[in-house]
Amino acid sequence: MLVVWEGIVLVANPLPVILPSPANVAGRLVALLSTPVVWADLGISTGRVLAGFILGALSGVFIAVVLAMNPFVNRSLRYLLISMRFVIPFAWVPIAAFWFGLSETGKVFITWYASFFVIVFQARAGIAAVPDLYVKVAHTFGLSPRRILWQITLPAAWPSLVVGMRLGLSFSWVAILAAEMVNANSGIGYFINYSGQFLATNDVMAGMIIIGVLGFCSDQLLSWLGRRILPGTLTAI
């Protein structure tokens, strides 16, 4: 990709505002990472993503368990949840701005919403895929429903839960960037939008690289934690 990028710059010789060279962007990236402002924006964005993602993971797994264990609730909420998952988080940005203003609550709400639905459906699918034989054997040994849930169902569904959480984390990163571009005065999304307004394309692309690296690292960390928690269940992840 770098070779193609450099080749386009050499052949087409576009203005830097249209497409800066890789060396230009790399220089700006090094300069930005040496300033405390960018690190502060990264810390703010990361905190918003983690807060919304953790809430999304906890509430998503809880709702998935309720849906799996209670057929009435599943019938009552299934179609509502399916419909709501198609309302993308970006549609909530202006409403969150009206409700919460520039407060952190609005950004956390957007990241929670972005992660919640994918975690619910992935966790629900994982729980539904647990073989009935496991549960029947547990009943034979006299395990209570609570112990079956914690010792049989959730460990068996753990790979699906981790996949759902990884997807939810990636959606949270996308959502927070959109929210910060529209309704924020801090964060890496705000930095990218601010740089774009002043035609600083090299800063915009440097910010994109930072987000890509940070998102990759957070995804791999979550995958590693999943393998560490239940090491025998995640051979496919």
Image (cartoon, rainbow, N blue to C red):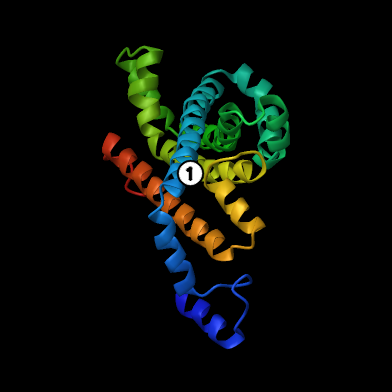
Residue 235 seen: yes
Residue 218 location in percent, x, y?
A: 40, 45
Q: Secondary structure at mark 1?
A: helix
Residue 69 location in percent, x, y?
A: 51, 20
- Residues 213 and 161: in front is 213
Residue at image position (48%, 71%) is: 24
Q: Say whether residue 199 is left or right of residue 165.
A: right
Q: Is residue 201 above or below residue 192?
A: below
Residue 194 location in percent, x, y?
A: 61, 52
Q: Say whether residue 122 is left or right of residue 78.
A: left
Residue 35 location in percent, x, y?
A: 41, 52
Question: In the image as oriented, which residue stretches furthest toward the bottom?
Answer: 11
Residue at image position (55%, 44%) is: 171
Residue 230 seen: no
Residue at image position (55%, 41%) is: 186
- Residues 64 and 40: in front is 40
Q: Residues within 10 Å of mark 1 (few under 14, many from 20)?
A: some
Residue designated by label 1: 41
- Residues 22 and 4: in front is 22
The quadrant holding residue 147 is top left
- Residues 96 and 112: in front is 96
Q: Is residue 193 above or below residue 21?
A: above
Query: How many numbered circles does the render carry?
Result: 1
Residue at image position (29%, 34%) is: 229
> Three-letter amino acid code at disc 1?
Asp
